[in-house]
Amino acid sequence: MNRPHKPAVFRLDDPGIVVTPSEAPRRIAAPSPHPPASLTRPSPASGGGLARGAGDGGAAAAPATETERLPLVPPQRRRLPWAGMFWVSAAGLLLLATGLGIANLVEDLLNRAAWLGGIGAALAAVAAVALLAIVTREALSLLRLATIDTLRQRAAAILVSDDRAAGRALGRDLIALTRRMPRLARARARLESHLGDIIDGRDLIRLSERELMAPIDAEARRLVAAAAKRVSVVTALSPRAAVDMLFVLLTALGLVRRLALLYGGRPGTLGLIKVMRHAVSHIALTGGMAASDSLIQQMIGHGVAAKLSARLGEGVLNGLLTARLGLAAIEATRPLPFTALRQPALSDIAGSLLRGSASRGAEEALQDQRSP
Amino acid sequence: MALTLSDLIEQARLAARSVMEYGEGLINPTVRLGITGLSRAGKTVFITALVHGLVRSGRFPVFEALSEGRIARARLAPQPDDAVPRFDYESHVQALVADRVWPESTRQISELRLVIEYQSRSGAMRELTLDMVDYPGEWLLDLPLLSKSFETWSAETLELSRRAPRAQLAKPWLAHLATLDVTGQAEEGAAIDAARLFTEYLAACRQERYGMTMLPPGRFLMPGDLAGSPALTFAPLDVAPNDAPPAGSLWAMMRRRYEAYKDFVVRPFFRDHFARLDRQIVLIDALAAFNAGPEAVSELQDTFRSLLDCFEAGRRNFLSALLRPRADRILFAATKADHLHHTSHDRLEAILRRMVERAIARAYVAGADVDVIALAAVRATREAQVRRGGAALPCIVGVPMPDGDSAGGNRNGPDGKMLDRMTEVAVFPGELPSDPEALFAPGAAPFRGLAAARAEEADFRFVAFRPPPLETTGDGVPALPHIRLDRALQFLIGDRLT
């Protein structure tokens, strides 16, 4: 065996050496291969992480490859370049046409009166700047969502590999992500102080999750429950189907947006569509697996309520669907997979939905509006 | 192994006792934490640091019950056995914290009970009692003797004594053994001489330089209150494994004393403290073996192989919980992980995993949870990069122990100057091999240790450091720094505190 360095003892005041507190150049000591984890039974947590990582991989891998080509081109499929080219060129033509129309308009206005032309040109400039701003914001928000997706994938990988350096890096990124959340100041400081300790990758992920995600999770659960309750009440009371459909749609969009905001994303329109797609595809992916408990609960809940009144049953069903969407949105927007903390299940929210009285629902809805 | 009458009685006793304790456990949940380790592996420090951390709310971020704030308090409680001395927690803490010295090697068995008051996740206030036993690590070496006859043990001991580097140390004893007539009349003088020479041989093997660990019977090295009694006055003889001794012979006397040793010393010790464990932590000081040499490393592996076969592990069910409790979680910990840089911890864990792979596989098949970590119950060093010439070495910085009994005699600094009692030095202890298989390949000499080479030529030099100055937690309570003690706690009792 080739042993490059013999053991050595140094005095700290030896002028021939330079001592730096161990932090920065830790890669010098060749990162050793990880011990084979074949014999240890993967703990339930890591097993769950693995399964979830695999499940997420399906949902999140495709968006991740898309986001590499960001910013601002609408999502494309690699399989159909022709369709993509058509849409891009059509959009380009449309843009050109609009530009030409505006140019012509300004020219016409100028021909008619100089001051009209001035106003037209100014409006056009403002519109152009605003458009640019919107596009930039959308692009940034998409980037941020992509960052959160990557964080989640990295965390899932670390839960399997137990890599210390990667865990530490992820912890730092999480702290950076949650920098703007005032209620996490203390948790962040605590986590930051632990990052310097010798803690293994898997433990660091669990620690970060407990420190940073616990308060956010509670808030998210509250948001979902409140939205579900509102939907069920409005559906039960609304006079027309069209009204409550519209209301459900708006509530769902609002809920997903607020959840994404809560977990550190800042979704614009495109981002919202993306998160929504994630959530819906997540429901589609896990629907089969979750059928055992939550779908049956849904049916029973619906059945019992429908016995009392058809409208009430519909309300409960809509509420449960909203809750499911909310839970899926939590999974799609949370920067860490659930390992140390319990994943909120439909039963957590359905319980309060079924037994919660209308008055309490209204009360919470009020509270919700007061503290957005 | 044939089941003898005494074995049957033993089993019945154990079962009766565990039925009693099962009833007690329903009212008052108790975890018997088995702390298993050879001498100098750090059992006393582990218990002290664990209790100190829980009582003073140490910095245990990975230990979820504590870091979530669900542990209201932990307090010491009167221990269950009145006949066993109490673990002297206060003076050990005093030694660590105020005097900055490690506790002296344990000479007596002692016991400690800790009651943890916590709130479960569902909101109920509960208590969990944690029972721990500290004992001289030497005594643990006796457990494999329980299944061995005098003749088997003699043959094995003799075989072992002819291997390097023991052969040299065993010379006086072997010379005396050659003069003995085993079938002749029993003589107390001969027995006393044999026992004395045998004990000296064992003590010589234990020196830090050789680092041998397979040295039963343990009471020869740490007699406790039995020094000089006939049960401790015997030695292995050169006898055929399957013969019966003639009546009145030296052989018959030695054999009788060996059996008495097993019956009166080993079996009660095992029955009282190890037969009924709920959780087990196995502390292994692999670094001392690395100091000594490849022979010590492979002997450490053999020692733990035979030792861990004595413990039962496996998933609990109602019947086993009632009649024969077994550890359903086992943690293998390479202690003194603060003696090397954290970038090497993975390698240390891999080596440890390889060392105890048979026990891991057995526990795994039986359904127990197993984990392997590098641990420092009290972290005595900090880390630094030392750049000399072009190379940067990952080093550890600490105050070396002044007595110089550690490898290489670090009383002197690298330049030969006498070091002050509290001078810090940076140590690069050597690089652990990345492939544990290479260490245990038969006939390989993967590195040089103190047993075979001069101190300057050894490939490893893990230095003993003084206990650290105290750091304070966020609440201003002083806490002992550690490495992965919280992870160990989480693994061992975390699930009982949910």
Image (cartoon, rainbow, N blue to C red):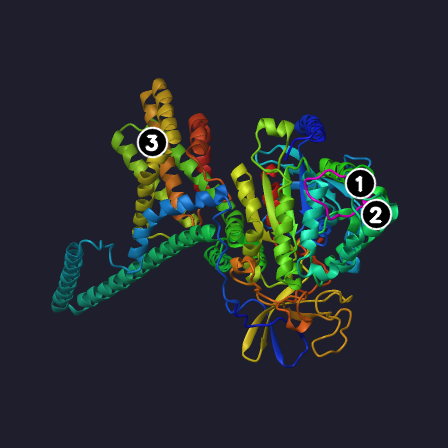
Q: Is residue B286 above or below residue B26?
A: below
Where is residue A343? Give x, y as percent: 46, 40
Amino acid identity at mark 2: Ala
The image quadrant where one finds the C terminus of chain B is top right
Front-most of residues B218 and A39: B218
Which element carries disc 1, helix, strand or loop?
A: helix
Which element carries disc 2, helix, strand or loop?
A: helix
Q: Which residue is mark 3?
A: A318
Front-most of residues A114 and A345: A345
Q: Which residue is mark 2?
A: B191
Residue stretch in magenta: B231-245
* CA distance for labels 3 and 2: 89 Å
Q: Is residue A18 magenta?
A: no
- The numbered mark 3 sits on a residue in which chain? A
Q: Are marks 1 and 2 on the same chain?
A: yes
Position of residue B120 in the picture relative to residue B40 (left or right) = left
- The numbered mark 1 sits on a residue in which chain? B
